[in-house]
Amino acid sequence: MDFKMHEYTHAIVGKVTPALRLTDKADFNDARRQHDCYLRLLRELNVDVLEVDLAGTFPTNVVVEDIGIINHGIALLPRQLDSGEEYKMKKIREILKRELGQSIIEVADPDAKILGSDVLFTGREFFVGISETSNEIGASAVAEAFPEFPCTPIKVSKGAQHLKKYITVAGPDILCVGASKEAKELLKRIEREATFSYQTLTVPEDDAANCLYVNGTLIHRAIEEIPDSFKVFCEKIDFARRSICFSELAKISTGLSGCCLLVRKP
């Protein structure tokens, strides 16, 4: 594996600003505090955090994962998600291109559906969760944008959430997966279709499955939020780990991956 695949220089994040319309799913003040801690931790891991005022309302102004699939100096941007996100897309596109030197590829096919939260990159290959939010045409766009990596569509069970809600990368060749029926089914499909082999770290709580592996460090949620899974991380992970409270932000996103776009500047 090219370990630089999990080394990042920058993170694009939305600025948490008092919004015109607040969601009732998450407490705004707690979410803002958690977001501050999240940004501080990324900076401690030598990531240059670009905090961008994306306008709009909370939580759409802090959940940025779906805006793009970024890897190897290329940013694949889906077709505009909805009319209200035009400014957000434009702002992030400008930063990716001008400040971070990424080559921009925009999904051209009007029938293509692809969201970042449905796309898992292991460092060796892509898996795209096929559901209501991402389809086979969208998966083909990922394959075309990153031809040097295998790209496999994986069917997500009806009613299940985004792929990265259940499975993420927890380290070099390690997949972190929840213990629910949906998570196990997805893992089975991935293992059957994968070009490469991976170790799996199964965590008892699905809420623990979405983690971030950044610059040699695993970021997962705090003990008070995932007590059983926290023990698993302690017992099984023998490299750097950091934990963080993310309860409010997780209510409005897939989890830790949902609030940043990680980029390696060429």
Image (cartoon, rainbow, N blue to C red):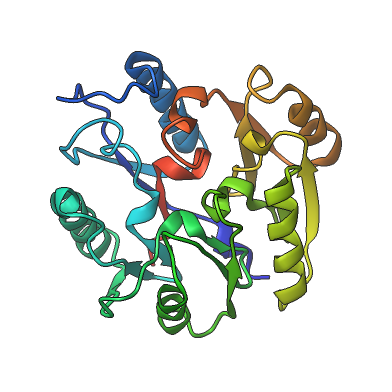
In the image, taking residue 139 as reference, residue 199 lies left or right, namely right
The residue closer to the viewer here, 109 or 105, is: 109
Q: Can residue 196 be seen in this view?
A: no
Of the 4 image quadrants, the one containing the C terminus is bottom left
Q: Can residue 42 be seen in this view?
A: yes
Q: Where is residue 51 in the image (x, y as percent from the top left)?
A: 27, 38
Question: Which residue extends farthest right?
Answer: 235
Q: At x 37% / y 54%, what residue is drawn?
A: 66
In the image, taking residue 76 as reference, residue 42 lies left or right, namely right
The residue closer to the viewer here, 185 or 165, is: 185
Question: Which image quarter: residue 97?
Answer: bottom left
Figure disc tally: 0
In the image, taking residue 193 as reference, residue 254 lies left or right, namely left
Q: At x 45% / y 23%, what residue is drawn?
A: 248
Q: At x 35% / y 68%, what residue is drawn?
A: 75
Q: At x 35% / y 60%, what residue is drawn?
A: 68
Question: Which image quarter: residue 19?
Answer: top left
Q: Position of residue 10 (x, y in %)?
A: 39, 50
The residue closer to the viewer here, 8 or 109, is: 109
Question: Which residue extends farthest front?
Answer: 158
